[in-house]
C-alpha cells in the first residue's frame, strides 16, 4: 500500500505570499494531522482533522488554516508568509483519532 | 503542560553495539501513549515503536525495545546490534489522552551516529 504522500516536495516563496500544501493519507485512514518542523527542533502540531472536521489546533496564528476533503486528503494554507515560516511541513495520517501516526516525506518551504 | 525531554543532542555508537537513547516525559494524564520516530536526512519521520501507559510489558519491535519506567516517567529507546543505516535523528513523542484528539508532542531529538 502507498504511504502518506505530500506535494510539492520543495517550495520557495517570498514574504507576504500565500502557499498551499497538499497531503494524501494512507488508504483507509480518516485522520490527517499537520506539523511544522523548523531546523534543529522537533515537529510542532498545527492541526488535526478527522472525518473532515477540525479536531485539534496547535498554537499557530490565524494565517494558518487547513481543510480535509471527502476523500480524506487535506490542504494546509498559510497566508502572508513570514521568514519564520520556513520549515519542513509534515503530514501524518492515522485510522483512528488517537492511533499511531504515519508521516509523509514532508514539504520543505523556504520563504525569502 | 505535557513535555518531552531528550537530554542527548548527539550520540555515537560502534557498529554492532547496543545504544540507549534517553527520553523523559511530564504529564498529569493517566492515559497516554509514547512513541519513537526515526528521521533520516531525507526528512520523513519513520515510526519505530509504541508504548501505552497501561501496558505492563516493555514494547519490542525487532532490534528496537522501549525501556518504560512509569514511576520515573522515562521511556528510553534501546537499539541492539547497531547498523550504519541507523544513523539518523531520533525523536521521542507523547500523545496526550485517548479522548477527543491525538496530537503528538515531540522532544528536540537525538542525533545518532553509527561508526564502522
Image (cartoon, coloured by chain):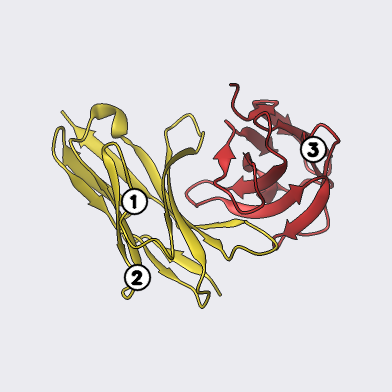
Question: Toward the viewer: B86 or B101?
Answer: B101
Q: Which mark is residue B70?
A: 2
Chain ID for label 2? B
Q: Say if B39 sits above or below B94 in the image.
A: above
Q: Secondary structure at mark 3?
A: strand
Chain ID for label 1? B
Chain ID for label 3? A
Task: Name the residue at 64% across, 42% down.
Answer: A95
**Residue B109 spot, x, y in % from top left:** 41, 51
Mark 2 vs mark 3, foreground winner is 2
**Residue A101 spot, x, y in % from top left:** 57, 44
Residues at marks 3 and 1 touching, judged by CB atoms closer than 8 Å? no
Q: Secondary structure at mark 2?
A: loop
Residues at marks 2 and 1 touching, judged by CB atoms closer than 8 Å? no
Which of pointers 2 and 1 lies earlier in the amino acid sequence?
Answer: 1
Q: Which mark is residue B8?
A: none
Give the quadrant of residue A2: top right
Which residue is most to the bottom?
B28
Question: Toward the viewer: A106 or B53?
Answer: B53
Residue under numbered circle 1: B59
Crowdedness near tag 3: few (<14), some (14–19) or many (≥20) residues, C-alpha within 10 Å = many
* Mark 2–mark 1 distance (CA, rounded to whole Å): 13 Å
**Residue B66 spot, x, y in % from top left:** 31, 53
Mark 3 vs mark 1, foreground winner is 1
Left or right of A41 in this view: A5: right
Task: Name the residue at 70% across, 26% down.
Answer: A7
Viewport quadrant of the N terminus of chain B: bottom right
Q: Which mark is residue A75?
A: 3
Q: Secondary structure at mark 1?
A: loop
Identify by letter the chain in yellow.
B
Question: Toward the viewer: B48 or B8?
Answer: B48
Amino acid at each position: 500500500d502507498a504511504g502518506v504522500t505530500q506535494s510539492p516536495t520543495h517550495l520557495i516563496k517570498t514574504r507576504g505570499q500565500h502557499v498551499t500544501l497538499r497531503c494524501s493519507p494512507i488508504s483507509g485512514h480518516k485522520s490527517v494531522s499537520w506539523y511544522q518542523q523548523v531546523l534543529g527542533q522537533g515537529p510542532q502540531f498545527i492541526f488535526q482533522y478527522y472525518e473532515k472536521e477540525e479536531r485539534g489546533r496547535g498554537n499557530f496564528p490565524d494565517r494558518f488554516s487547513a481543510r480535509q476533503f471527502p476523500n480524506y486528503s487535506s490542504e494546509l494554507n498559510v497566508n502572508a508568509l513570514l521568514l519564520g515560516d520556513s520549515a519542513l511541513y509534515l503530514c501524518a495520517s492515522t485510522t483512528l483519532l488517537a492511533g499511531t501516526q504515519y508521516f509523509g516525506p514532508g514539504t520543505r518551504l523556504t520563504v525569502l | 503542560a505535557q513535555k518531552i525531554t531528550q537530554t542527548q543532542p548527539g550520540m555515537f555508537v560502534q557498529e554492532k553495539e547496543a545504544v540507549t537513547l534517553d527520553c523523559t516525559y511530564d504529564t498529569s494524564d493517566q492515559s497516554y501513549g509514547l512513541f519513537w520516530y526515526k528521521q533520516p536526512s531525507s526528512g520523513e519521520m519513520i515510526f519505530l515503536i509504541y508504548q501505552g501507559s497501561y501496558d505492563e510489558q516493555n514494547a519490542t519491535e525487532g532490534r528496537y525495545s522501549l525501556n518504560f519506567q512509569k514511576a520515573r516517567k522515562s521511556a528510553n529507546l534501546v537499539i541492539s546490534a547497531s547498523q550504519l543505516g541507523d544513523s539518523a535523528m531520533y525523536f521521542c513523542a507523547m500523545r496526550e489522552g485517548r479522548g477527543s484528539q491525538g496530537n503528538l508532542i515531540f522532544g528536540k531529538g537525538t542525533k545518532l551516529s553509527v561508526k564502522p
